[in-house]
Amino acid sequence: MSSPITIPAWQRPHWQPSDEEILLQFYVFGKFEAVRVPSADYGSPGLPPGIEAVNHNHASLRQWEGYPLKGGMGRMFKDDAPEAYKLALDAPEVMVVRGTLKDSPATGYLRDTLGVLAGMLDIGGLAILDPQTLSLLDAAAWRRRFLVRDGAPIRNHLLIMRDAEPEADHSWIHTRGMRKFGRPDISIRSVPDAMTDHAGILCEKLVELEALGAHFIDGQPLEIDGLGASVVAHLGGGLDDADFNNTFVEFRWPE
């Protein structure tokens, strides 16, 4: 059997101190052995201060108002990931991993948390749900996405979506999950459908800059490679925003 992959942490070269807050939240479904989680195998000393793991009886958790396998979210998971959904739904226990942290110049907090999640899969975890990226993965799929030698790309930690705009033949490109890095999500409006690939690449570059610590300022212009045009950053949103559950930086595609 090959040795587990050590999850790396990366520095954030664009980071400057701020009052922004990092939020991590995961649900691990399974039947867990009563042993210490083997997170050290993945380079993690355990959960960072501010993040806690609480084991719940699944039957009790179903009564919770925020239970993620019911309502519209539950139907989405059932349609998109039926096998993982059944594993999660039938599991007798749920480990809820959640907490907030101060903005950080490095991502050791994320490595340490992911290492604990990986260890939980080794002692009875069957599926992991991430409400911030609207993802539900069985153990094998989660390992493929995050246990990547030299580290999973930043893109794997986020959700980038494309939705139709009211304006014909235009799309809205936007993200979820940047609260893992204490940063606003990205929104790019009024993208012509012929330019959505270009906008998707731009979106990936922007979230990577933020994940590496960058901040955008309201009214900040940004040149778009290959277009000879610029867009302007507008800040908005908040934790109660229905689309992001986060603040966001919004850009409007140039005409």
Image (cartoon, rainbow, N blue to C red):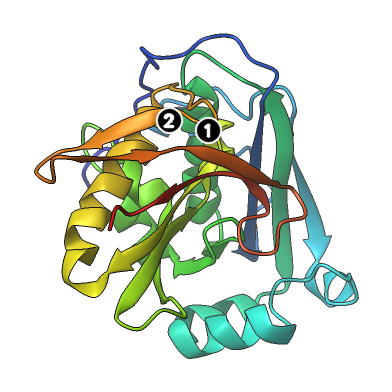
Instruction: Give the residue at mark 2.
Output: 210
| Mark linked to residue 138 | none
Q: Amino acid at mark 2?
A: Glu
Residue 87 visible to an observer of this rendering = yes
In this view, the residue in front, 223 or 177, is: 223
Q: In percent of the image, x 55 and y 60: which residue is there?
A: 125
In this view, the residue in front, 173 or 86, is: 173
Residue 86 visible to an observer of this rendering = no
**For the residue carrying disc 1, how many other residues have a C-alpha within 10 Å: few (<14), some (14-19), or many (20+)?**
many
Q: In percent of the image, x 26 and y 38: which residue is there?
A: 3
Rendered location of residue 237, percent (x, y): 67, 48
Quarter of the C terminus within the rendering: bottom left
In this view, the residue in front, 116 or 187, is: 187
Q: In percent of the image, x 67 and y 25: which residue is there?
A: 20
Q: Amino acid at mark 1?
A: Phe
Q: Is residue 160 left or right of residue 103?
A: left
Task: Decide: is 45 above or below 198.
Answer: above
Q: In percent of the image, x 13 and y 46: which residue is there?
A: 227
Label 1: element kind: helix
Rendered location of residue 235, percent (x, y): 59, 39
Q: Is residue 78 left or right of residue 65?
A: left
> Disc 1, disc 2: CB below 8 Å?
yes
Q: Is residue 136 left or right of residue 19?
A: left
Rendered location of residue 247, percent (x, y): 64, 43
Rendered location of residue 233, percent (x, y): 46, 37
Q: Is residue 224 left or right of residue 52?
A: left
Task: Decide: is 17 above or below 167.
Answer: above
Instruction: Give the residue at mark 1.
Output: 181
Label 2: element kind: helix
Q: Residue furthest front?
A: 255
Query: What whole-number distance in Å separates the C-alpha atoms at marks 1 and 2?
Result: 8 Å
The image quadrant that residue 148 belongs to is top left
